[in-house]
Image (spheres, rainbow, N blue to C red):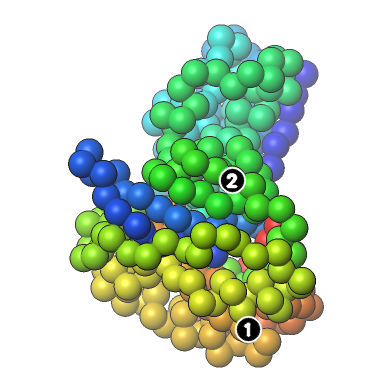
Amino acid sequence: MMTKTFAAAKINLTLHVTGQRPDGYHLLDSLVMFADVGDRVRLEPADAISLEVKGPMAAGVPADASNLVWKAAALYDLPVAITLEKHLPTAGGLGGGSSDAAATLFAMVDLTGNTTMPEGTTGLGADVRVCLARQAARMRGIGEDVQPVEGVPELHAVLANPGVAMSTPEVFAALDEKQNDPMPKRIPRWRGAWSAIDWISKQRNDLQAPALKLAPVIGDVLAALSALPGARMARMSGSGATCFALFEDRGEADAAADDLADAHPDWWVTAATLR
Ligand code: ATP
């Protein structure tokens, strides 16, 4: 038996850094959604665990036991041959590794029929929890507190990454003020994309300023996204360098993504629908 799972890109529509614990972990308050673009994970029972990494974004992704898909699969007794097809930029703020790990866990549930997650899943990474939710969610604490947010309208986006890999710890280290306001207590029930985008645009990504200091090209990405016809707002996701612009209409996002890709052939650019 063989099983395939989709590992959706995680977009932090907001990312408020609200504190730092004595052990160094940062406290977050983030609204996360998932895109219809992502990696693909294929698993097949085998004599021993193995990993092949392929696809347009495979370069530089470890194909050994340090890969999160390997670590996730190794939590089970069943050895599997893993094929990981990378479409998401690595170290790009889209939670690629975490989403790949979550997809592997879902695939292992499929293969083993065992629906209880093994011990050690949280040790895979702070974003694995939210990636297991696979739906719009509010993430708090150090990522362990995940509350699904119901009724969030579908949003359309252009995603753009200028090809610089960002180290998440370095971006956090470059953040001067660790204690910032959380999001409003209640996330409203939006009537449609327009009101959701309006609310989101009033929130922040506190990692955007420090990431900009480390990689000024992110400023060019944000400016280019903001200038796209139909773009309602632009912001960075996670610790960067991928940024997103939000649209009310998928057709507008598709056209804008084509324009942006033509203007910046060296950037990774795609239209996406967020859920
Ligand atoms: P986040 O938004 O959670 O900070 P990210 O998208 O910035 O994540 P990843 O793409 O998950 O970052 O990669 C971070 C590092 O993890 C990479 O530099 C890579 O060496 C390692 N890694 C381990 N497993 C994977 C994987 N499956 N895909 C990509 N990178 C992986």
- How packed is label 2: few (under 14 Cα within 10 Å), some, or many (20 or more)? some
User: Residue 174 in the image: x percent, y percent?
Assistant: 23, 63
Which residue occupies the foreground of this view, 86 or 37? 37
What numbered label is drawn on residue 209?
Answer: none
* Vertical placement of residue 25 versus 160, above or below: above
State the SS at label 2.
Answer: strand
Which residue is denoted by mark 2 in the rendering?
A: 147
Name which residue type carries label 1: Ala
User: Residue 93 in the image: x percent, y percent?
Assistant: 45, 57
Name which residue type carries label 2: Gln
* Vertical placement of residue 190 versus 90, above or below: below
Please identify the quarter of the rendering in which residue 78 is found: top right
Dividing the image into 4 quarters, which one contains the C terminus? bottom right
In percent of the image, x 40 and y 53: which residue is there? Answer: 28
Residue 169 horizontal side relative to residue 91, left or right: left
Dividing the image into 4 quarters, which one contains the N terminus? top right
Q: Earlier in the sequence, mark 1 or mark 2?
A: 2
Mark yes or no: residue 266 visible. Answer: no
In percent of the image, x 49 and y 18: which residue is there? Answer: 119
- How packed is label 1: few (under 14 Cα within 10 Å), some, or many (20 or more)? many
In percent of the image, x 59 and y 22: which residue is there? Answer: 117
For marks 1 and 2, give the CA distance. Answer: 28 Å
Query: Do tag 1 and tag 2 residues touch (Cβ < 8 Å)?
Result: no
State the SS at label 1.
Answer: loop
